[in-house]
Amino acid sequence: MGPLPKRKISKGRRNRRRAHDSIGVPKLVECSNCHAKMMPHRVCPTCGYYKGRQVIEIEEI
């Protein structure tokens, strides 16, 4: 049998420890080609460009 805690951790102490675990708002940057908002370090879903060159073909609707 392994070691066990000597006392129960209170709800307040537990919740203070978890204060930084929440998911924040996603950061958005502007695409250098079409100037649409997109997630950083990803291919632009609007135009298909990444780092100034076209990576994927986007079908026109």
Image: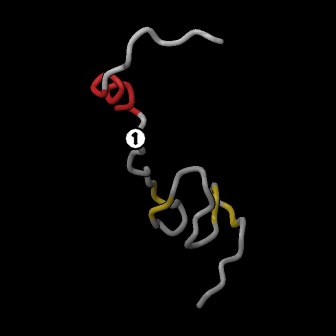
Query: For the C terminus, which image quadrant?
Result: bottom right
Quadrant showing the N terminus: top right
In the rendered image, the vertical position of residue 45 relative to residue 29, given as above or below: below
Label 1 crowding class (10 Å Cα cut-off): few <14, some 14-19, many 20+?
few
Question: Residue at the spot x=33%, y=30% of the render?
Answer: 15
Q: Which residue is mark 1?
A: 22
| Callout 1 amino acid | Ser
Observer-nearest of 47 and 39: 39
Residue visible at 43% across and 8% down in the picture: 6
Q: Residue furthest left?
A: 12
> Could you tell me which residue is drawn at 61 percent across and 87 percent down?
60
Which residue is more in the foreground, 14 or 52? 14
Locate residue 49: give its quadrant.
bottom right
In the rendered image, the vertical position of residue 23 relative to residue 9, given as above or below? below
Give the residue at the far front of this rendering: 1
Would you say 18 lies left or right of 51 here?
left
Give the residue furthest to the bottom: 61
Residue placed at 63% from the left, 61% from the top?
43
Near-viewer residue (38 or 14):
14
Q: Position of residue 21 (x, y in %)?
A: 42, 35
Up the image or down, 2 lies above or below 43; here it is above
Query: Quick check: 32 left or right of 11?
Result: right
52 is higher (above) or lower (below) than 58: above
Q: Secondary structure at mark 1?
A: loop
Residue 44 percent location from the top left of the image? 58, 64
